Image (cartoon, helix red, strand yellow):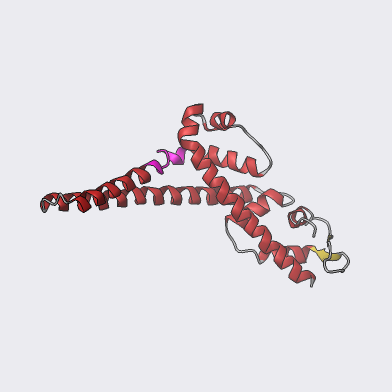
Amino acid sequence: MTNVRELLARLNPTVARLDGTAGRGAVELTNIDIAGALGMVPAGIGRDLLELLHGPDPSRGDILLVLEGITRMALEERNRRSKDYADARATWGIAECMARFNRDREERTIRHLEILKARVAVARDRLWPERLEERLPEIATVAIGYMKGERLSNRERATVLGVGDSTYREGWAEVVDWLLTQMLEAEQCAANRFCHALQQSAA
């Protein structure tokens, strides 16, 4: 089948052609068919990326929608990681205080406290750098550029973010990689839904 992403770029012509399957010839799809299939893709960052990256003439509004989606994803994940860390600290702190109150130094209690303390360390290591909001425009630029085919080195990404190489590797690389994974998966899911809707239109 024709790459369905290419059909978005051909919304301006009157008719696009979709390669047939199962022995059928090419099926003609009008702009209405393509736009209707796109409308069947659930709203969200996946569809927004699909339109921004492959649409015929992305507008400033399309860019802002994607930037809003990236910002929401990043801040929600940052908050989730911060909450996980706070919860782990609280759980460990309560258990340690109760052990002291009860003067409980049994081996199983000590082992349990060590496990809880280790969970705090793991959650702390997963925290994202502070002042994330200040870096999000540059992070979004790097992420969208990657999806457009740009392949920047870590050093080049660090330059875009305005940080040193080691600072990028130790903190910001994980943020960028996480966002890219989410964006790639969301865009692929949207493309799959778009393809399914097109097949139904062509049936």
Residue drawn at x 59%, y 55% is 186
Residue 136 seen in render: no
Location of the N terminus by quadrant is bottom right
Q: Residue at x 48, y 37 (%)?
A: 172
Q: Position of residue 60 (x, y in %)?
A: 63, 47
Q: Which of the 4 image quadrants contains residue 122?
A: top left
Tell me if residue 129 is in the magenta stretch.
Answer: yes
**Which residue is nearer to you in this view: 123 or 197?**
123
Judge from the rendering whether residue 138 lies leftward or rightward of residue 81; answer left or right. right
**How far across and how far down the image is residue 187, in percent?**
63, 54
Q: How many marks?
A: 0
- Confirm whether the magenta stretch covers residue 155: no
Residue 193 image point, x, y percent: 66, 63
Q: Quadrant of the C terminus?
A: bottom right
Residue 22 in the figure: left or right of residue 95: right
- Which residue is at 76% across, 70% downward? 201
Taking the image as drawn, is residue 167 in sight? yes
Q: Which residues are magenta?
A: 125-134
| Type of secondary structure dominating the magenta stretch | loop
Q: Which residue occupies the foreground of this view, 170 or 38? A: 170
**Position of residue 81 measured from the top left corner of the image (x, y, whole percent):** 40, 49
Name, please, the residue furthest toward the front: 107
Apparent side of residue 103 relative to residue 95 in the rendered image (left or right): left
Q: Which of 5 and 174 lies nearest the eye of the viewer?
A: 174
Q: Is residue 45 above or below residue 133?
A: below
